Amino acid sequence: MKMGQDIELNIIKCMLVAGLFYLAIPNVFASTTLPHLLKLGDSLTQVKHKLSEKCEALTVQRLPRLLSVASNNQYLIKCQGFEYLGFQHSIELMFSDNQLDVIQILGTQAEHEDLRILLKQEYGTPSYSSKEVVYYQDLGISLRTKPHNITFVSERVVREYSRFSNGLR
């Protein structure tokens, strides 16, 4: 990698860490002390407040129970115009029993290759990799190409996915 690419990758890494999410997973982004906007496990009210000035449009809808981690209810926040790595995106945030469990950033075509490199540099070899997805099972991070998005899930969803994927083996 050329020196310019190293600097660009470090800038992207700082933007990713500074502007986004603290994942409630051990050692994820642990090396930074920069503030983070969202935290998996936060309540619907907390997240709505944090996003109130970060979205051009924000909607909340009740969902049918999609994840088994939800005992009572699930809600989805849709946010249009959220800035991620210098680009405007739509994001979707799923809550189960008032806890943020899924963060999905849609339309990441422009950043896809940089995100793939960053994830590999930060976390090593993914659990699974194909043309369509790079997946870090233990961290609950997936980078997809069809459609382009990056998804972060909570520890309890990671456990649910792990039970499912282990059952397939």
Image: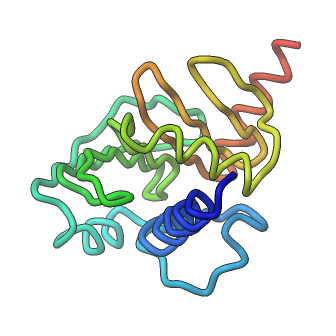
Spot occupied by residue 166 in the image (x, y as percentages of width and height): 85, 23
**Residue for point 36% across, 40% down:** 110
Spot occupied by residue 46 in the image (x, y as percentages of width and height): 35, 72
Q: On the rendered structure, is 87 left or right of 6?
A: left
Foreground of the two, 104 or 41? 104
Q: On the rendered structure, is 39 left or right of 138?
A: left
**Screen quadrant of the C terminus:** top right
Foreground of the two, 129 or 110? 110
Foreground of the two, 13 or 147? 13
The residue positioned farthest toward the right in the image shown: 169
Spot occupied by residue 38 in the image (x, y as percentages of width and height): 44, 68
The vertical placement of 63 against 83, above or below, is above
Q: Would residue 169 be visible to someone looking at this image? A: yes
Image-quadrant location for residue 45 = bottom left
Q: On the rendered structure, is 66 left or right of 88?
A: right
**Residue for point 30% across, 74% down:** 50
The residue positioned farthest toward the top in the image shown: 168
Image-quadrant location for residue 83 = bottom left
Q: Would residue 41 be visible to someone looking at this image? A: no
Image-quadrant location for residue 22 = bottom right
Spot occupied by residue 104 in the image (x, y as percentages of width and height): 42, 43
**Residue for point 31% across, 60% down:** 86
